[in-house]
Amino acid sequence: MSYERIGEDLKRKAKEADLVSYLKARHPRSVRFSDHPDKPGFVCWRSVEHDSLTFYRKEERDGRSIYKYTRHSTDETDDGIGYLVRYEGYSFINAIKALAAFEG
């Protein structure tokens, strides 16, 4: 069995990719713009299949923007790579490659 190595630069680029734009382009039936599940009066990008799952951009301490999601019903939070692996069926390597290559 051979393993493919992914560099830190590629992982960083994948984490900084705009997850919502990627999903709108590649998985348009996965996201919708609607009311926030926990904040009345606020709207956000949400998962179509998992009603409590929201997407957002978070500023890191080093100034980078990381795109993340939270599934409010389970308190699960992760980045775009984790979302593609858990909810869209990507392998870890393919999720990194897809997000890093996305120009959206």
Image: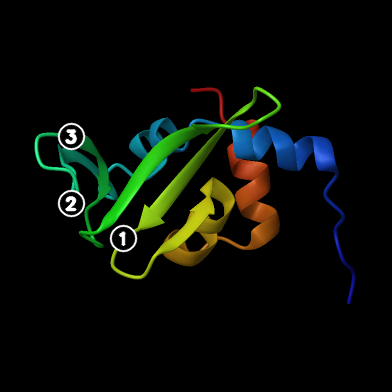
Numbered mark located on residue 72 in the image:
1
Query: Mark 1 touching mark 2, by CB under 8 A?
Result: yes
Horizontal relation, residue 11 to residue 103: left or right: right
Measured Cα–Cα span from mark 1 to mark 2: 8 Å
Horizontal relation, residue 100 to residue 52: left or right: right
Mark closest to the chain's N terminus, 1 or 3: 3
Measured Cα–Cα span from mark 3 to mark 2: 9 Å
- 79 vs 17, nearest the viewer: 79
Residue 101 sits in quarter: top right
Numbered mark located on residue 43 in the image:
3
Residue kind at label 1, given as amino acid type: His
Numbered mark located on residue 28 in the image:
none
Query: Mark 3 touching mark 2, by CB under 8 A?
Result: no
Residue 67 at x, y percent in the picture: 51, 37
Residue 17 sits in quarter: top right
State the residue lying farthest toward the left.
41
Residue kind at label 3, given as amino acid type: Val
Label 1 Cα crowd, 10 Å radius (few <14 / some 14-19 / many 20+): some
Horizontal relation, residue 18 to residue 29: left or right: right
Residue 92 at x, y percent in the picture: 66, 60
Q: Establish if 64 lies above or below 25.
A: above
Query: Mark 1 touching mark 3, by CB under 8 A?
Result: no
State the residue lying farthest toward the bottom.
1
Q: Element under label 1? A: loop
